[in-house]
Image (spheres, rainbow, N blue to C red):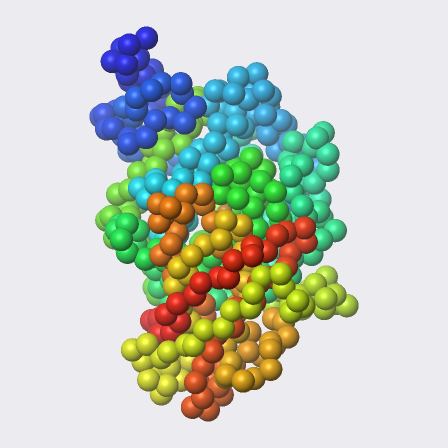
Amino acid sequence: MQASSRRAFLRQTIAAGAFGSAAFALSRALPLAAQSSPPVLDDNAARTRDWLASRRVVTRRNVADLSAAELTLLRDGIRILRERSAANPLDPRGWYAYAQLHSAFCGTNTYEDQVHYGWFFLPWHRGYLIALEQLLQETVAEPQLALPYWDWTTSPQIPVAYAGGPDNPLSDPTRIMQPADIIPWDLLAVGPVLRAPTWNSFGGHPRVDPAAPQIEGCMEQGCHNNTHNWMGGNIASFSGAGYDPIFHTHHGQIDRLWAAWRTADPSNHPNPSDPRLLEKRFFFYGPDGHPFVIRVGDLLDPEACGYRFDSLAFNLNVRALPAYRDSAEKVRDDFVPAGEVVRTPVTFGDSTRKELLAALGAPRARVILQFDRKQLPIHPYCVRIYLRAPGEPAPSGPADPRFVGTYTYLPIPGLELGLDRHCVTQLEVTDKHAALLRSGSPLVATLVPVQLRDRVIPPQTLEVRNASLRIDA
Ligand SMILES: [Cu+2]
């Protein structure tokens, strides 16, 4: 087929779908179609909005609360998706196509397409889950089917329903961690997420200028990345994560944190209003196999997208869970890391000690420790950070009062393009550091790589620059 006639064919095919309207060119090719030139996708966002609003609102529940029948239905749905891909890897209603879409937009080093490292992170993943929920509902002919979420703040172990062998379509053989393993509690901190005073610090900074630093929201780099990486295997990489069905439960929890942050303080936690974000369009595959385009501005309200959550409560004190009793070793820095411990001086940025101390006690301000991470290792890399005075003894683990937080680098391939060379990491500093600030001592940030089981800590030293404190309000 000639390129022009192939384009015309695709245009016709897409227009014949359920969502066709005015034409607009999407910059990338459908990842699975074998065509050599980009198709023209209809900007059917208005129709998508009406379609989702017309759906029955389903309630997403904790995976631990699903009945056997509900789990069977979910398994049946994922099994059928896997079978479709086995029969035809190009089937856009198959598991492979669904996973590939994540690879295309999350594993890419193209600035325009990459949806991590900033404000596209939450809305893109919300759309991605909606697409799966709609597909599963149609696949098993059950409009009540809702994706579950995994609340790791109350159950810090991989849900048993997602483990097991090849007979369980919810399992993934590449995962390193199993349901008997417990996620270190400091990897699961949602307090800083729910306290974030602005959309930027919560959901990520604007992503409009390739030359500007990429600044993730505190959720993305923290509990989100930490949990992905901790599990290991497909789910621990941007290009593989979509293949592991645990993805939709983990991201169900991430999406629930967005709903909870909004609800916790609706007047002070507004959704984003910048038209550069709201008018951004993403596409996903609909249950009929045709792409549907969705506008970020139409993704802000879960109920308008066909779902709600049974609960928006989170456990802010994960460490007190019975799972951690007698298991101090699970959260210790053993300080014999294969990677190097990094120490870097911390400046006061534009603020004085006095202003920073006032912000520590203010209800809607936060003090942030931020630094540039100039070089990213190829491996995922989980790091604990401490704030202390020079010359003090080494930190002893996340229970150490000098502990600030834990975050994970999830690198993407293609460092030479520079996409992830200019990332800024931000961590909340709380009033437990007030005495140190008051002391007048210079400050040092210490970064300690966390040795996760069967994981390689990269040999190169983490390069950290421009560490400073600032006030976020
Ligand atoms: Cu993710």
- Observer able to see residue 295: no
Horizontal relation, residue 234 to residue 330: left or right: left
Q: Is residue 344 above or below residue 150?
A: below
The residue located at (73%, 37%) in the rendering is 164
Q: Residue furthest bottom?
A: 439
Nearer to the camera, 449 or 222: 449
Number of numbered markers? 0
Q: Is residue 454 above or below residue 314?
A: above
Nearer to the camera, 201 or 3: 3
Residue 221, how many percent across, how many down?
47, 57
Q: In this view, does 151 lie above or below 99?
A: below
Nearer to the camera, 210 or 360: 210
Check the picture and name the quadrant holding the N terminus. Answer: top left
The residue located at (39%, 51%) in the rendering is 420
The residue located at (70%, 63%) in the rendering is 330
Residue 282, how many percent across, how many down?
34, 37
Horizontal relation, residue 366 to residue 249: left or right: left
Nearer to the camera, 47 or 108: 108
- Observer able to see residue 396: yes
Residue 399, how many percent across, how many down?
63, 74
Q: Is residue 473 above or below residue 287?
A: below
Check the picture and name the quadrant holding the C terminus. Answer: bottom left
Horizontal relation, residue 460 to residue 326: left or right: left
Quadrant in the picture for residue 354: bottom left
Residue 141, how many percent across, how many down?
55, 24
Horizontal relation, residue 213 to residue 317: left or right: left
The residue located at (61%, 71%) in the rendering is 398
